């Protein structure tokens, strides 16, 4: 089965050449992209979709979410808006509600959040554990997450539960809990922050998870300057997320991690050489916690690879709108529209190690539009991606294809 999407006013590929095609067309064959180019050269297909002069982007790649939870934290949000400062301790409120919720209801809630994200153009999505915080509930969260998300991250090191010794809990995270979640997860993360896990504890968690064969991520430098960025680069983490408070040496460390990487990889489709640590900015969270927005402009100018993600969670960023994150990055972080869209598509794929792959290796790339890549597409109800920032707050998703399958759009 093949589908021709034609009459595309603007096709923003986000491929290695950063191409933007006008009057373009794309052919989907099953779950893959089989052709793209000028409308006049488009081949025949089994089905035809007229884009009506709209813009086509890769589907959003949301590389940082916390969707496995129950409960409500609006009271905390109201208090923060009234002037109280954010601290990591609010996670404990969600932990209690999550532990007391059935598997069926946790799955139902998570599936609803994924559907909401997909209906807004998100076609590839990561989510974490981290609201169980004991062996049984972390394993349960990982198992449920593996049924609803594309990528699952183990975040047993989210917070030390009340009444537990930090060192004893760290040993649990590095040992029996890691063993219990391992069948369901690809990544591990740690909240390296004051009030959560210190540098030594964070390093122990990361190294134990690396030894177990997991890729690494870090929550770092959200509430102040600290060791998170430096530690992420040291252990070769795929990403460090939040990055609100950065010293000059932090920026240099992130930039240096990419010094041997070639974005084109010699083939024009995937990177080669020593890949570095992606800096993932979470602007919706920054607004909700009233932290300074992450210095995305400075990071890009320094040569750091950037991602944008929603950080959808009940306490500090209860939104799955990647369009809102892109809009904020343009209007308040001084990114261009193209840079912001790239960070929300290709950048997220890079943070998840899914930016490359094609017909040859069978691991299809996401986050960009190229032949052989997964057919994850987002058609806007606008003639160009510029409208995402030009018309802030307006729902612009017209159609979504996820692995070649049309999705419901609300």
Image (spheres, rainbow, N blue to C red):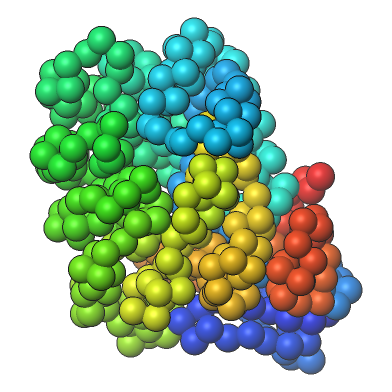
Q: Quadrant of residue 397?
A: bottom right
Does residue 172 show up? Answer: no
Q: Is residue 246 left or right of residue 204?
A: right
Q: Is residue 109 left or right of residue 234?
A: right
Quadrant containing the C terminus in the rendered view: top right
The one nearer the camera, 292 or 183, is 292
Instruction: Name the residue at 72% across, 67% down.
Output: 388
The one nearer the camera, 279 or 247, is 247
Instruction: Name the residue at 77% across, 56% down.
Output: 393
The one nearer the camera, 227 or 263, is 227
Residue 347: x, y in percent?
Answer: 45, 65
Number of numbered labels in the structure image:
0
Residue 241: x, y in percent?
Answer: 37, 52
Residue 184: x, y in percent?
Answer: 35, 32
The one nearer the camera, 162 or 157, is 162
Residue 74: x, y in percent?
Answer: 62, 26
Instruction: Name the residue at 49% across, 58% down.
Output: 293
Instruction: Name the residue at 65% across, 50% down.
Output: 321
Quick check: 14 above or below 42? above
Does residue 219 show up? Answer: yes
Q: Is residue 233 left or right of residue 401?
A: left
Quadrant containing the N terminus in the rendered view: bottom right
């Amino acid at each position: 089965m093949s589908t021709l999407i034609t009459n595309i006013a603007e096709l923003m590929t986000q491929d290695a050449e950063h191409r933007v095609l006008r009057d373009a067309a794309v052919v989907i064959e099953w779950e893959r992209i089989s052709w793209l180019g000028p409308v006049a050269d488009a081949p025949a297909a089994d089905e035809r979709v007229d884009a009506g002069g709209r813009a086509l982007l890769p589907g959003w790649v949301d590389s940082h979410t916390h969707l496995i939870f129950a409960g409500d934290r609006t009271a905390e949000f109201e208090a923060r808006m009234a002037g109280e400062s954010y601290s990591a301790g609010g996670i404990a409120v969600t932990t209690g509600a999550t532990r007391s919720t059935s598997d069926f209801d946790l799955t139902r809630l998570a599936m609803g959040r994924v559907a909401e994200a997909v209906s807004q153009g998100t076609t590839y999505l990561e989510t974490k554990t981290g609201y169980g915080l004991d062996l049984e509930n972390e394993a349960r969260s990982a198992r449920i997450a593996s049924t609803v998300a594309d990528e699952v991250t183990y975040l047993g090191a989210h917070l030390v539960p009340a009444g537990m010794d930090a060192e004893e809990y760290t040993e649990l995270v590095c040992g029996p809990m890691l063993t219990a979640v391992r069948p369901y997860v690809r990544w591990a993360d740690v909240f390296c922050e004051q009030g959560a896990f210190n540098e030594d504890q964070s390093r122990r968690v990361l190294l134990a998870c690396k030894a177990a064969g997991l890729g690494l991520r870090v929550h770092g430098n959200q509430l102040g300057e600290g060791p998170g960025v430096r530690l992420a680069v040291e252990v070769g983490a795929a990403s460090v997320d939040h990055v609100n408070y950065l010293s000059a040496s932090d920026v240099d460390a992130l930039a240096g991690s990419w010094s041997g990487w070639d974005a084109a990889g010699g083939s024009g489709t995937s990177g080669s050489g020593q890949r570095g640590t992606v800096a993932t900015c979470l602007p919706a969270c920054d607004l909700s916690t009233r932290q300074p927005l992450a210095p995305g402009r400075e990071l890009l100018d320094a040569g750091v690879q950037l991602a944008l993600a929603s950080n959808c969670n009940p306490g500090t960023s209860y939104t799955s709108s990647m369009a809102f994150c892109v809009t904020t990055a343009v209007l308040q972080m001084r990114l261009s529209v193209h840079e912001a869209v790239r960070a929300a598509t290709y950048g997220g794929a890079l943070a998840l190690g899914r930016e490359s792959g094609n017909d040859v290796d069978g691991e299809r790339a996401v986050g960009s539009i190229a032949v052989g890549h997964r057919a994850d597409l987002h058609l806007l109800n606008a003639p160009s991606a510029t409208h995402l920032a030009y018309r802030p707050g307006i729902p612009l998703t017209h159609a979504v294809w996820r692995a070649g399958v049309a999705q419901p759009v609300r």
